[in-house]
Image (cartoon, rainbow, N blue to C red):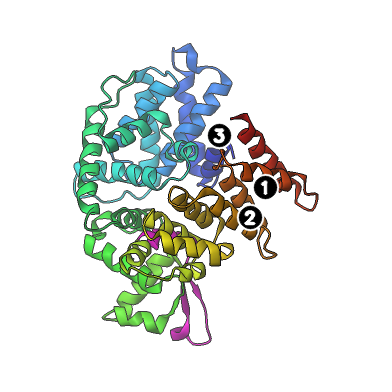
Amino acid sequence: MNYFSAKEKYVNASSLNTRTKLYQAIEDVIDKSSDSSMLGRGLKRCIQLELSYIMLKYKKWSISECLSEATIDFLNSEYRIPRKESTELVEVCLDIIQATQTLAHFKSPEDVDHDFLLNLFIETTIAKDESKLEINLGFGRNLIDIIENATIGVDDEKREFEYSSNIKSIMTSIIQDIIEKIQLKPWIIDLYRLKNILFTKANLDSESLSEELIENYFNILNFISFSGITRKSLSKMFKCEESQEKAINALVRSELIYIEPKSKTENDLMHLSKLGIETTAEYFANGFKKSNATDFSSLTKLPSQFQATTLSSIGSSFIEQQLDLLQSYGGDLSPAALEILAKNLKNNVEDNKIIDILWDIYHYDTSTFFLRSAIINIMGSFTDTELVIDNLKSIAKDQTNSKIVASRAQSILDRCQSF
């Protein structure tokens, strides 16, 4: 899905009444503008889509001055819309959002700005694809650079385009705070992520989302874990049935868990959703690493996200156990986990040994198309090994392979031979 179609899909999922009002208000401002650069129909359509996307995505923070500033700066830097017209566009859109949405309650203006920018930082941190991140955030490359530079301590004073010092100072403060907390809680990012999910999806008031409540809900998710538990078993974590139902309803609305109904309500099974698994994977990985486990075979019974996050957390530690995992159970891992495992082993185990094991896994009858594709990708990282060239040639020429697998092998083979 390309840049504009992804945003259009998001905007079209919103209220028809709200997006119609937004598009009309934006068109009215553009039509009466004396700046001819905004008058092109194609450009007008782009501005309507981009601005509506930002307004709808961040409607919970519509009273944030930092949201206004970031949006004005985005229009000014990406579309070269003069600051006067950019400000007018943002103001009319915020008026519509605030008139059609229930405003979230924050303790202070500073609190809403902090919460908004914290949300941007969390989304940036958990993103796996930078091009998708730019689409998802909606503010172009400039703001991502601000976040990344603040994270690594880079002075960006020489940048051609400048965001307000307020945004940069708050973002720097947020990052410094997280760096301090992550030493004690490596899963702190997921706690903040959980707060955002409950705020945006379950419509819980920001003021009610205390650290204690977030910790409690996070513990519930970890108690449910990947195997699931009954409603009756979950009741042990609550003082009363009312607080249990309140928590369950919030987690279901947030799409963090789902319920598998049984004949008796108390036997209903609670399961983590894909989002719930993603939110608790780091916590599980940290516990697995601290356990100093000698047998890694249990990882094969975990969801893909748990496998990948745990192996990523382990890194170059426990090489002997990781090599045994690859040799004995590599075919039972998810494609993502297998790629991380191979990366962990690459600088610690002889290349040809890893390649030989992967070649065996590739030919397992149980190996899926996705696992074989992952193995081809891994082999492409061993560009200076003749064994890889021979293996890729064999895959590319094997007519029993799918065309996609053969084509992928040929593509990587061509790249390897070009070095």
Name which residue type carries label 1.
Answer: Asn
Tell me where residue 408 sits by quadrant.
top right
Residue at point 65%, 41% (across, down): 389
User: In the image, residue 412 lies at what x, y percent?
Assistant: 63, 39
Disc 3 versus disc 1: nearer the observer: 1
- The residue to which callout 3 is attached is 4
For marks 3 and 1 on the same chain, the one whose residue lies earlier in the sequence: 3
Which of the two labelled residues, at mark 1 and mark 2, occupies the earlier sequence position? 2
Disc 3 residue type? Phe
Tell me whether circle 1 and circle 2 mark residues in contact (CB < 8 Å). yes
Asked whether residue 255 is in view, the answer is no
Q: Residue at x 39, y 41 (%)?
A: 97
User: Residue 232 at x, y = what percent?
Assistant: 39, 84
Disc 1 residue crowd, few under 14, some 14–19, many 20+, Cα 10 Å: some
Relative to 278, 150 lies left or right: left
Query: Mark 3 falls on what kind of element?
Result: helix
Q: Give coordinates of residue 23: x percent, y percent.
A: 50, 33
Look at mark 1 in the image and give the residue it sits on: 391
Q: Which residue is mark 2?
A: 359
Position above or below: 172 against 232: above
How far, Cα to Cα, is label 2 from label 3?
Answer: 41 Å
In this rendering, the answer to whether 239 lies above or below 391 is below
The total of numbered circles placed on residues is 3
Amino acid type of disc 2?
A: Trp
Question: What is the spatial separation of the Cα atoms under label 1 and label 2, in whole angstroms?
Answer: 8 Å
Which labelled disc corresponds to residue 39?
none
Q: Residue furthest bottom?
A: 264
Residue range corresponding to the magenta coloring = 258-282
Locate the C terminus and report the quarter of the image it occupies.
top right
Q: Disc 3, disc 1: CB below 8 Å? A: no
